Amino acid sequence: MKRYWKKTIIVIAIFLSALVLLQITGAEATKETSKKKRKRKKGKVTCIICHNQLGKEKAAWVKQWQESVHGKNDVTCPACHGGDPSSFNKPKIEGTGYIGKPSRLEVPEFCARCHSNTNWMRQYNKRTDQLSQYKTSKHGKGLFQKKDAQVAICIDCHGKHDISGISDPSSLAHHKSIAETCAGCHADEDYMLPYGLVTNQLAAYNNSYHGMIIKGKVDGKNPSLVPSCPDCHSPHGAKPPEVAEVHNVCGNCHMQTEKYFHQGEHKTALDEQNQPRCIDCHDYHEIRYPTSELFVGESIYHCGFCHLMNSKPYLKGIRIKEAIENAEREIVKVEKMVLSLQEAPGLDVMDLKETIQKARRNILEAIPKTHSLIEEDVTKHTDRALVLTGELQQKVDNMKKEFVTRKKGLFAALMVIGFLICFLLYKRWLLELKEEEM
């Protein structure tokens, strides 16, 4: 009997061991099969399959993502939305970390999970301070402090599934497109009404010198070097520059002009009275190409708007204006003279053209120095231009005289040659006549 039970126990033990071994083997096989399936689907997620089957807007999201900077860098759906992309089961089940669609109040911190992660973003050589800057902006303060979901957030400027790098011309945040993107809100009167903001910024910018360059309407100017909204207002820390910051903001591009501004009386006045700023003379969104006419008149942005017509500062401006315009007139005058010489055969005017360019460079150096309001610094360049144009006029006169002399010499030479030809023909005729008589 004991032997029977011993055998029975041994059989049961063997059976249970085999059963456990079979389960382990089966689990490993299932795991291996799952690995093979995932390997076959590497780079794919079931989100794509389902959303394509659903069609319309949901299928459009897939295509947008595939063409986006995220899709091209294999940042897939679960990276933003969570869930289990390896299963066709609903990804919303508990434990999969499914997030779904974040609210507008959540989006900035939602994006910052990656974009504020230095370890993650360094492989793309991208900044990670966007969220901290955004929180200092008018938009960020409205969102985080006032819970205003209508302010601009990441997706309003960069898109949702169709996000492109800012260097991509199709990007909403591309240099040539960002003004229109900002205007999506800022040109909407109803949208801006609660904030008490004007809505003419885009129209003004498009009429400005900056706007014309960025639209390719000014020959010889590079649109990529022209400021747009983020260049003056900051991309993520967006807000209007403070009074004391304006000349520094403009000085990011106009470095020489800022340097001369710091040397002049206007900088002293700015420190004491908070004006004049760059925008007080040049406007801010509708910045036109400045001319010497700004020195005269009482209209807004002109010197007479702040200074009395007979005051010393106003009269100084008149003198600076006259110095620049006089030099420019002389350059135009001598340039016409050189062009007229160019049409004459046998005259090389390349040296004269180079001298004209030197004169023009002096004017270009004089113009930014007008911001220092140091008259001598401006006239130093205009006087040099006048000296060069005077020398040019002398050279042009000499070349004209030389050309006339050459023409006279050529005429005389042709007369002599003609006389010789006639004389030789006459002699030949005489010889032929004698031969006939003989």
Image (cartoon, rainbow, N blue to C red):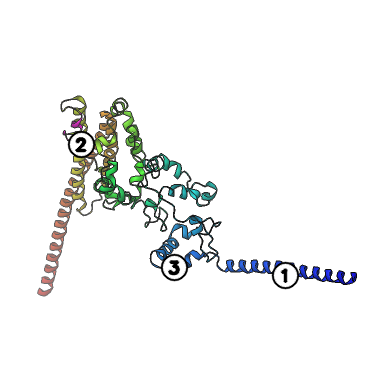
In the picture, residue 64 is in which quadrant? bottom left
Secondary structure of the residue carrying tag 3 is helix
Check disc 1: other Cα within 10 Å, few if <14, some if 14-19, many if 20+. Answer: few
Q: Amino acid at mark 2?
A: Leu
Going from the N terminus, do you reach mark 1 or mark 2 first?
1
- Look at mark 3 in the image and give the residue it sits on: 52
- Look at mark 1 in the image and give the residue it sits on: 22
Q: Nearer the viewer, residue 188 or 105?
A: 105
Q: Which residues are magenta?
A: 297-306
Q: CA distance from mark 3 to mark 1?
A: 40 Å
Q: Amino acid at mark 1?
A: Leu
Q: Residue furthest front?
A: 1
Mark in the foreground, 3 or 1: 1
Q: Is residue 302 magenta?
A: yes
**Which residue does the image show at 28% across and 26% down from the upper left?**
273
Q: Is residue 33 magenta?
A: no
Classify the position of the C terminus by image quarter.
Answer: bottom left
Residue 277's place in the image compared with 224, above or below, is above
Do tag 3 and tag 2 residues touch (Cβ < 8 Å)? no
Q: Amino acid at mark 3?
A: Asn
Say if residue 53 shows up in the picture.
yes
Say if residue 73 shows up in the picture.
no
Classify the position of the N terminus by image quarter.
Answer: bottom right
**Which residue does the image show at 15% across and 56% down from the upper left?**
416
Residue 385 in the image: state x and y as whole percent: 25, 37
Mark in the foreground, 1 or 2: 1
Q: Nearer the viewer, residue 159 or 73?
A: 159
- Look at mark 2 in the image and give the residue it sits on: 294
Residue 349 in the image: state x and y as whole percent: 25, 49
